[in-house]
Amino acid sequence: MHSSPLRPASAAALLAAALVLAGCASAPPGSGRAPAQVSRLSPEQSSDIAIHALGLVGTPYRYGGNTPEGGFDCSGLIGYVYGSRAGAPPPRTVAQLSGFGAPVDSGELRTGDLVIFGRGAPTHAGIYVGQGRFVHAPSSGGAVRLDHLQSRHWAQQNARFRRP
């Protein structure tokens, strides 16, 4: 029996199909551990995101706010930082952010990852900046601040992590 070699167009089509199928792979439901994800952000961009977020600490909170001049709510802060440092803003609401990117295990966190809080429905979000800390815009009357994931309040808030 004679087998014919793959033509370049056929080989390219097979490679493209394999890449698409590999992109659909995920951890089995209930595995308890999210796979480490490769970010589209370079390590430099991730670091720049964290530094930029830290530079906004002290900016007043404003519901619906998404600029340093007008203030920030939590998702507005994330959108502003990612839009200015990564070139593409993520979705605008916390509910949409909870499905943005890929899940990350807490042991795999790196700067620039998103921190999503809430039992069941997501209620709050921030940007992980390293050493167990995150930057967020917490509430009316407050300001953008740096907090620790293991502080009394935040350790009880069911944090999940996403990597854009």
Image: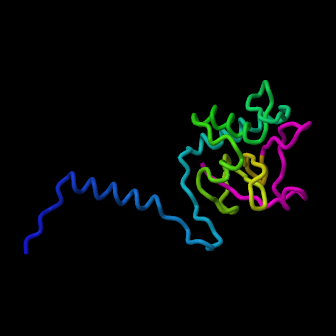
Residue 129, horizontal then vertical, whole percent: 73, 47
Residue 59 in which image quadrant: top right
162 part of magenta stretch: yes
Q: Position of residue 130 (x, y in %)?
A: 73, 50
Task: Please name whichever residue, 13 or 51, is drawn nearer the observer in this view of the structure.
Answer: 13
Q: Quadrant of residue 70?
A: top right
Q: Is residue 157 above or below residue 46?
A: below
Q: How many marks?
A: 0
Residue located farthest toward the left when viewing the structure as drawn: 1
**Horizontal arrangement in the rendering, residue 134 relative to residue 110 (left or right):** right
Q: How is the image coloured?
A: rainbow
* Image side of residue 20 versus residue 52, left or right: left
Residue located 12% across and 64% down the image: 4
Instruction: List x then y, in percent, for residue 3.
Output: 12, 69
Q: Nearer the viewer, residue 13 or 151?
A: 13
At x 78%, y 51%, the residue is 123
Relative to 58, residue 3 above or below: below
Residue sitting at x 84%, y 35%: 61
Look at the picture and state if 149 lies above or below 90.
Answer: below
Picture quarter with the N terminus: bottom left
Which residue is rendered at x = 56% and y = 44% of the image?
41
Image quadrant where residue 33 sits: bottom right
In this rendered view, identify the residue nearer to me: 150 or 68. 68
Residue 52 is covered by the magenta coloring:
no
Question: Which range of residues does the magenta coloring cover?
Answer: 135-164
